[in-house]
Image (tube, rainbow, N blue to C red):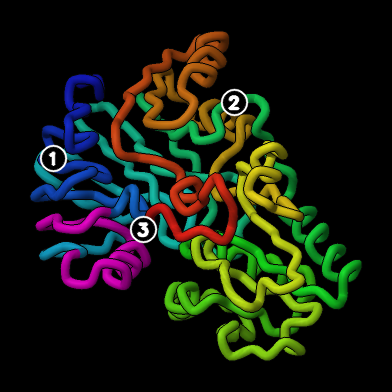
Amino acid sequence: MAHPETWLKSLPQGLFCAPGGFFIDPTRAVDRAVITHGHADHARPGHRAVLASAETLAIMRARMGKSAGVERQALGWGETLTIGDVRVSLRPAGHVLGSAQVVMAYRGARAVVSGDYKRAPDPTCAAFEPVPCDVFVTEATFGLPVYTHPPASAEIARLLDSVALFPHRPHVVAAYSLGKCQRLIALLRQAGWDRPIWLHPSLLPMCALYEAFDVALGDLRPVTRAGPSDLTGGIVLASPGSAAGPWLDNAVLVQASGWMRVRKRARAMGVELPLVISDHADWNELNATIDDVGAPEVWVTHGREDALIHAMARRGIRGRALRLVGYGDEEGAETTETGLREQPVSG
Protein backbone atom coordinates (compact mmCIF):
# COMPACT_ATOMS: atom_id res chain seq x y z
CA MET A 1 0.00 0.00 0.00
CA ALA A 2 1.24 3.49 -0.88
CA HIS A 3 0.63 5.50 2.29
CA PRO A 4 -1.04 8.86 1.51
CA GLU A 5 1.84 10.75 3.10
CA THR A 6 3.93 9.65 0.10
CA TRP A 7 1.54 11.12 -2.47
CA LEU A 8 -0.43 13.90 -0.75
CA LYS A 9 1.83 16.89 -0.27
CA SER A 10 1.39 20.22 1.48
CA LEU A 11 2.71 22.86 -0.94
CA PRO A 12 2.48 26.68 -0.92
CA GLN A 13 -0.50 26.44 -3.29
CA GLY A 14 -2.32 23.97 -1.01
CA LEU A 15 -2.76 20.22 -0.71
CA PHE A 16 -1.36 18.48 -3.82
CA CYS A 17 -2.17 14.97 -5.05
CA ALA A 18 1.03 14.11 -6.91
CA PRO A 19 -0.07 11.00 -8.87
CA GLY A 20 -3.21 12.83 -10.00
CA GLY A 21 -1.52 16.15 -10.74
CA PHE A 22 -4.22 18.22 -8.99
CA PHE A 23 -4.63 20.45 -5.97
CA ILE A 24 -7.55 20.37 -3.56
CA ASP A 25 -8.93 23.84 -2.76
CA PRO A 26 -5.70 25.58 -3.84
CA THR A 27 -5.14 29.07 -2.47
CA ARG A 28 -3.81 30.41 -5.78
CA ALA A 29 -4.44 29.73 -9.45
CA VAL A 30 -3.24 26.29 -10.63
CA ASP A 31 -3.59 24.11 -13.74
CA ARG A 32 -5.94 21.55 -12.16
CA ALA A 33 -8.06 22.01 -9.04
CA VAL A 34 -10.65 19.91 -7.22
CA ILE A 35 -12.90 22.23 -5.20
CA THR A 36 -14.82 21.08 -2.13
CA HIS A 37 -17.33 23.97 -1.95
CA GLY A 38 -18.05 27.50 -3.02
CA HIS A 39 -16.89 29.62 -0.07
CA ALA A 40 -14.25 32.14 -1.03
CA ASP A 41 -11.48 30.66 1.10
CA HIS A 42 -11.81 27.32 -0.73
CA ALA A 43 -12.98 28.30 -4.22
CA ARG A 44 -10.52 30.75 -5.80
CA PRO A 45 -10.56 32.21 -9.31
CA GLY A 46 -8.12 31.64 -12.16
CA HIS A 47 -7.69 27.85 -12.31
CA ARG A 48 -7.38 26.32 -15.76
CA ALA A 49 -9.37 23.14 -15.00
CA VAL A 50 -11.85 22.73 -12.13
CA LEU A 51 -13.60 19.58 -10.90
CA ALA A 52 -16.43 19.95 -8.38
CA SER A 53 -20.08 19.19 -7.80
CA ALA A 54 -22.55 20.78 -10.20
CA GLU A 55 -23.83 23.04 -7.43
CA THR A 56 -20.33 24.25 -6.52
CA LEU A 57 -19.55 25.00 -10.16
CA ALA A 58 -22.76 27.04 -10.39
CA ILE A 59 -21.82 28.96 -7.23
CA MET A 60 -18.35 29.65 -8.62
CA ARG A 61 -19.80 30.91 -11.91
CA ALA A 62 -22.21 33.17 -10.03
CA ARG A 63 -19.45 34.61 -7.86
CA MET A 64 -16.52 34.70 -10.30
CA GLY A 65 -17.92 34.73 -13.82
CA LYS A 66 -15.39 33.71 -16.45
CA SER A 67 -12.58 33.40 -13.90
CA ALA A 68 -14.29 30.36 -12.34
CA GLY A 69 -12.13 28.08 -14.51
CA VAL A 70 -11.41 27.64 -18.20
CA GLU A 71 -12.43 23.97 -18.13
CA ARG A 72 -15.14 22.96 -15.65
CA GLN A 73 -16.31 19.42 -15.00
CA ALA A 74 -19.08 18.33 -12.65
CA LEU A 75 -18.90 15.04 -10.79
CA GLY A 76 -22.05 13.58 -9.24
CA TRP A 77 -22.24 11.90 -5.85
CA GLY A 78 -20.73 8.43 -6.10
CA GLU A 79 -19.43 8.83 -9.65
CA THR A 80 -15.78 7.93 -10.10
CA LEU A 81 -13.23 9.62 -12.34
CA THR A 82 -9.63 8.55 -12.92
CA ILE A 83 -7.22 11.48 -12.90
CA GLY A 84 -3.69 10.39 -13.67
CA ASP A 85 -3.29 7.27 -11.55
CA VAL A 86 -5.86 8.25 -8.91
CA ARG A 87 -9.52 7.29 -8.72
CA VAL A 88 -11.48 10.31 -7.49
CA SER A 89 -15.06 10.53 -6.26
CA LEU A 90 -17.10 13.06 -4.30
CA ARG A 91 -19.30 12.48 -1.25
CA PRO A 92 -21.55 15.06 0.49
CA ALA A 93 -19.98 17.14 3.26
CA GLY A 94 -23.16 18.70 4.66
CA HIS A 95 -21.62 22.19 4.88
CA VAL A 96 -23.50 24.17 2.20
CA LEU A 97 -25.18 23.44 -1.13
CA GLY A 98 -22.90 21.21 -3.21
CA SER A 99 -20.22 20.89 -0.55
CA ALA A 100 -18.17 17.74 -1.06
CA GLN A 101 -15.57 15.48 0.42
CA VAL A 102 -12.87 14.43 -2.02
CA VAL A 103 -12.24 10.67 -1.92
CA MET A 104 -8.97 9.49 -3.50
CA ALA A 105 -7.86 5.89 -4.03
CA TYR A 106 -4.28 5.13 -5.07
CA ARG A 107 -2.28 1.90 -4.86
CA GLY A 108 -4.44 0.29 -2.21
CA ALA A 109 -4.83 3.35 0.02
CA ARG A 110 -7.77 5.69 0.42
CA ALA A 111 -7.57 9.30 1.59
CA VAL A 112 -10.54 11.57 2.19
CA VAL A 113 -10.31 15.37 2.26
CA SER A 114 -13.49 16.54 3.95
CA GLY A 115 -13.28 20.28 3.29
CA ASP A 116 -15.60 22.10 5.70
CA TYR A 117 -18.43 19.98 7.07
CA LYS A 118 -21.16 19.62 9.65
CA ARG A 119 -23.19 16.70 10.94
CA ALA A 120 -26.35 18.57 11.99
CA PRO A 121 -29.43 18.22 9.77
CA ASP A 122 -29.75 20.88 7.06
CA PRO A 123 -32.72 20.97 4.67
CA THR A 124 -30.73 22.96 2.10
CA CYS A 125 -27.89 20.53 1.32
CA ALA A 126 -27.03 16.84 1.19
CA ALA A 127 -26.06 15.32 4.54
CA PHE A 128 -22.47 14.36 5.40
CA GLU A 129 -21.59 10.75 4.58
CA PRO A 130 -18.74 9.12 6.56
CA VAL A 131 -16.32 7.35 4.23
CA PRO A 132 -13.96 4.71 5.72
CA CYS A 133 -10.38 5.57 4.85
CA ASP A 134 -6.71 5.27 5.74
CA VAL A 135 -6.16 9.02 6.14
CA PHE A 136 -8.89 11.54 6.92
CA VAL A 137 -8.25 15.26 6.44
CA THR A 138 -10.47 17.31 8.73
CA GLU A 139 -11.08 20.94 9.56
CA ALA A 140 -11.07 22.05 13.20
CA THR A 141 -12.81 25.44 13.11
CA PHE A 142 -14.55 24.66 16.39
CA GLY A 143 -11.92 22.25 17.66
CA LEU A 144 -12.19 23.10 21.36
CA PRO A 145 -14.44 21.42 23.95
CA VAL A 146 -16.17 24.74 24.71
CA TYR A 147 -17.75 24.71 21.26
CA THR A 148 -20.87 22.57 21.40
CA HIS A 149 -23.76 23.63 19.19
CA PRO A 150 -27.35 23.29 20.43
CA PRO A 151 -30.00 21.99 18.00
CA ALA A 152 -30.62 24.64 15.35
CA SER A 153 -34.38 24.18 15.80
CA ALA A 154 -34.06 25.29 19.42
CA GLU A 155 -32.19 28.44 18.38
CA ILE A 156 -34.85 29.23 15.76
CA ALA A 157 -37.46 28.81 18.50
CA ARG A 158 -35.58 31.42 20.53
CA LEU A 159 -35.72 33.79 17.57
CA LEU A 160 -39.46 33.30 17.11
CA ASP A 161 -40.02 33.71 20.86
CA SER A 162 -38.23 37.05 20.65
CA VAL A 163 -40.34 38.11 17.66
CA ALA A 164 -43.45 37.33 19.70
CA LEU A 165 -42.06 39.17 22.73
CA PHE A 166 -41.24 42.32 20.73
CA PRO A 167 -44.01 42.49 18.11
CA HIS A 168 -43.36 46.14 17.31
CA ARG A 169 -39.67 45.69 16.48
CA PRO A 170 -38.09 44.09 13.41
CA HIS A 171 -35.46 41.41 13.96
CA VAL A 172 -32.37 41.88 11.77
CA VAL A 173 -30.39 38.65 11.54
CA ALA A 174 -26.77 38.80 10.33
CA ALA A 175 -25.90 35.69 8.34
CA TYR A 176 -23.38 35.14 5.58
CA SER A 177 -24.71 34.92 2.05
CA LEU A 178 -23.81 31.36 1.04
CA GLY A 179 -25.25 28.59 3.17
CA LYS A 180 -26.19 30.25 6.45
CA CYS A 181 -28.78 32.58 4.92
CA GLN A 182 -30.58 29.81 3.07
CA ARG A 183 -30.42 27.42 6.01
CA LEU A 184 -31.97 30.00 8.32
CA ILE A 185 -34.79 30.61 5.86
CA ALA A 186 -35.47 26.88 5.52
CA LEU A 187 -35.40 26.41 9.31
CA LEU A 188 -37.82 29.29 9.77
CA ARG A 189 -40.18 27.70 7.24
CA GLN A 190 -39.92 24.36 9.04
CA ALA A 191 -40.81 26.14 12.29
CA GLY A 192 -43.98 27.51 10.71
CA TRP A 193 -42.94 31.06 9.73
CA ASP A 194 -44.96 31.60 6.54
CA ARG A 195 -44.72 35.39 6.40
CA PRO A 196 -42.40 37.13 3.92
CA ILE A 197 -38.74 37.13 4.88
CA TRP A 198 -37.00 40.36 3.97
CA LEU A 199 -33.48 40.20 2.54
CA HIS A 200 -30.73 42.67 1.92
CA PRO A 201 -30.29 42.72 -1.90
CA SER A 202 -26.81 41.18 -1.58
CA LEU A 203 -28.42 37.91 -0.39
CA LEU A 204 -30.95 37.56 -3.19
CA PRO A 205 -28.74 36.11 -6.00
CA MET A 206 -27.52 33.16 -3.94
CA CYS A 207 -31.06 32.44 -2.75
CA ALA A 208 -32.16 32.36 -6.39
CA LEU A 209 -29.37 29.90 -7.15
CA TYR A 210 -30.48 27.63 -4.31
CA GLU A 211 -34.02 27.69 -5.64
CA ALA A 212 -32.72 26.79 -9.11
CA PHE A 213 -31.44 23.59 -7.46
CA ASP A 214 -34.92 22.87 -6.03
CA VAL A 215 -34.33 24.26 -2.53
CA ALA A 216 -37.68 25.91 -1.74
CA LEU A 217 -37.34 29.10 0.34
CA GLY A 218 -40.80 30.64 0.14
CA ASP A 219 -41.72 34.32 -0.06
CA LEU A 220 -38.51 36.39 -0.12
CA ARG A 221 -38.56 40.16 -0.63
CA PRO A 222 -35.84 42.84 -0.89
CA VAL A 223 -35.80 44.92 2.28
CA THR A 224 -35.09 48.05 0.24
CA ARG A 225 -38.71 47.91 -0.96
CA ALA A 226 -40.21 47.55 2.50
CA GLY A 227 -42.03 50.27 4.34
CA PRO A 228 -41.83 50.68 8.13
CA SER A 229 -45.13 48.89 8.62
CA ASP A 230 -43.91 45.94 6.53
CA LEU A 231 -41.02 45.32 8.91
CA THR A 232 -42.97 45.64 12.16
CA GLY A 233 -42.71 42.26 13.81
CA GLY A 234 -40.88 40.96 10.78
CA ILE A 235 -37.57 39.19 10.10
CA VAL A 236 -34.80 40.70 7.99
CA LEU A 237 -31.66 38.81 6.90
CA ALA A 238 -28.48 40.65 5.95
CA SER A 239 -24.83 39.72 5.68
CA PRO A 240 -22.89 41.04 8.70
CA GLY A 241 -21.20 43.72 6.61
CA SER A 242 -24.36 44.98 4.92
CA ALA A 243 -26.76 45.21 7.85
CA ALA A 244 -26.65 49.02 8.04
CA GLY A 245 -29.83 50.70 6.83
CA PRO A 246 -33.10 52.29 7.88
CA TRP A 247 -34.47 48.86 8.78
CA LEU A 248 -32.17 48.93 11.82
CA ASP A 249 -34.34 51.59 13.48
CA ASN A 250 -35.66 50.03 16.68
CA ALA A 251 -34.48 46.60 15.49
CA VAL A 252 -33.43 43.64 17.59
CA LEU A 253 -29.94 42.81 16.32
CA VAL A 254 -29.38 39.09 15.89
CA GLN A 255 -26.41 37.06 14.69
CA ALA A 256 -26.38 33.37 13.74
CA SER A 257 -22.93 31.83 14.10
CA GLY A 258 -21.07 29.16 16.00
CA TRP A 259 -18.94 31.96 17.43
CA MET A 260 -22.01 33.22 19.31
CA ARG A 261 -21.25 30.51 21.88
CA VAL A 262 -18.78 33.09 23.27
CA ARG A 263 -21.12 35.66 24.81
CA LYS A 264 -18.33 38.19 25.29
CA ARG A 265 -17.84 38.23 21.54
CA ALA A 266 -21.55 38.76 20.96
CA ARG A 267 -21.68 41.65 23.42
CA ALA A 268 -18.63 43.31 21.84
CA MET A 269 -20.39 43.20 18.47
CA GLY A 270 -23.59 44.73 19.82
CA VAL A 271 -25.61 41.56 19.22
CA GLU A 272 -28.80 41.59 21.27
CA LEU A 273 -29.86 38.03 20.44
CA PRO A 274 -26.98 35.63 19.68
CA LEU A 275 -28.01 32.40 17.96
CA VAL A 276 -25.56 29.50 18.08
CA ILE A 277 -26.19 28.14 14.58
CA SER A 278 -23.12 26.98 12.69
CA ASP A 279 -22.42 25.27 9.38
CA HIS A 280 -19.30 23.65 10.87
CA ALA A 281 -18.99 20.59 13.07
CA ASP A 282 -18.65 21.30 16.77
CA TRP A 283 -16.20 19.59 19.12
CA ASN A 284 -18.35 16.51 19.67
CA GLU A 285 -19.17 16.17 15.98
CA LEU A 286 -15.52 16.45 14.96
CA ASN A 287 -14.57 13.63 17.30
CA ALA A 288 -17.59 11.50 16.35
CA THR A 289 -16.75 11.92 12.66
CA ILE A 290 -13.16 10.85 13.21
CA ASP A 291 -14.44 7.73 14.97
CA ASP A 292 -17.02 7.10 12.23
CA VAL A 293 -14.52 7.08 9.36
CA GLY A 294 -12.18 4.78 11.30
CA ALA A 295 -8.98 6.26 9.91
CA PRO A 296 -5.85 5.37 11.92
CA GLU A 297 -4.36 8.72 10.90
CA VAL A 298 -6.04 12.14 10.72
CA TRP A 299 -4.61 15.34 9.29
CA VAL A 300 -5.99 18.68 10.52
CA THR A 301 -6.00 21.53 8.02
CA HIS A 302 -7.09 24.63 9.92
CA GLY A 303 -8.65 25.74 13.16
CA ARG A 304 -7.83 24.56 16.69
CA GLU A 305 -5.53 21.66 15.78
CA ASP A 306 -3.76 21.02 19.08
CA ALA A 307 -6.77 20.10 21.22
CA LEU A 308 -8.21 17.81 18.55
CA ILE A 309 -4.87 16.07 17.98
CA HIS A 310 -4.50 15.55 21.75
CA ALA A 311 -8.01 14.06 21.98
CA MET A 312 -7.25 11.70 19.09
CA ALA A 313 -3.97 10.58 20.64
CA ARG A 314 -5.84 9.46 23.75
CA ARG A 315 -7.85 7.13 21.48
CA GLY A 316 -4.78 5.78 19.68
CA ILE A 317 -5.31 7.84 16.51
CA ARG A 318 -2.29 9.52 15.00
CA GLY A 319 -2.90 13.23 14.38
CA ARG A 320 -0.96 15.64 12.21
CA ALA A 321 -1.37 19.40 11.80
CA LEU A 322 -0.98 20.38 8.16
CA ARG A 323 -1.07 24.11 8.95
CA LEU A 324 -2.12 25.05 5.43
CA VAL A 325 -2.18 28.82 4.96
CA GLY A 326 -5.11 30.71 3.48
CA TYR A 327 -8.15 28.92 4.89
CA GLY A 328 -10.52 30.33 7.44
CA ASP A 329 -14.09 30.24 8.62
CA GLU A 330 -16.53 31.94 6.25
CA GLU A 331 -18.43 33.11 9.31
CA GLY A 332 -15.32 34.82 10.64
CA ALA A 333 -14.46 36.23 7.23
CA GLU A 334 -17.76 38.09 7.07
CA THR A 335 -17.96 39.02 10.74
CA THR A 336 -16.39 42.16 12.16
CA GLU A 337 -15.33 42.47 15.77
CA THR A 338 -16.76 45.97 16.18
CA GLY A 339 -20.38 45.55 15.21
CA LEU A 340 -22.95 44.68 12.59
CA ARG A 341 -22.91 48.13 11.02
CA GLU A 342 -19.38 47.85 9.61
CA GLN A 343 -18.47 46.95 6.04
CA PRO A 344 -17.55 43.33 5.27
CA VAL A 345 -13.95 42.31 5.80
CA SER A 346 -14.00 39.86 2.88
CA GLY A 347 -16.06 37.28 1.02
Residue 20: give its label.
1
Disc 2 marks which residue?
Answer: 144
Gap between marks 3 and 2 measured at Cα: 25 Å
Q: Is residue 212 rendered magenta in the image?
A: no
Amino acid carrying mark 3 in the image: Gly
Residue 38: give its label.
3
| Image height of 96 relative to 332, above or below | below
Residue found at x 26% / y 63%: 74
**Residue 336, percent from left and from top:** 51, 49
- Name which quarter of the figure residue 163 lies in: bottom right
Q: Earlier in the sequence, mark 2 or mark 1?
A: 1
Q: Which residue range is magenta in the image?
A: 44-67
Could you tell me if residue 270 is visible in this image? yes
For the residue pair 14 and 163, the one nearer the viewer reads as 163
For the residue pair 76 and 328, the one nearer the viewer reads as 328
Q: Is residue 55 rendered magenta in the image?
A: yes
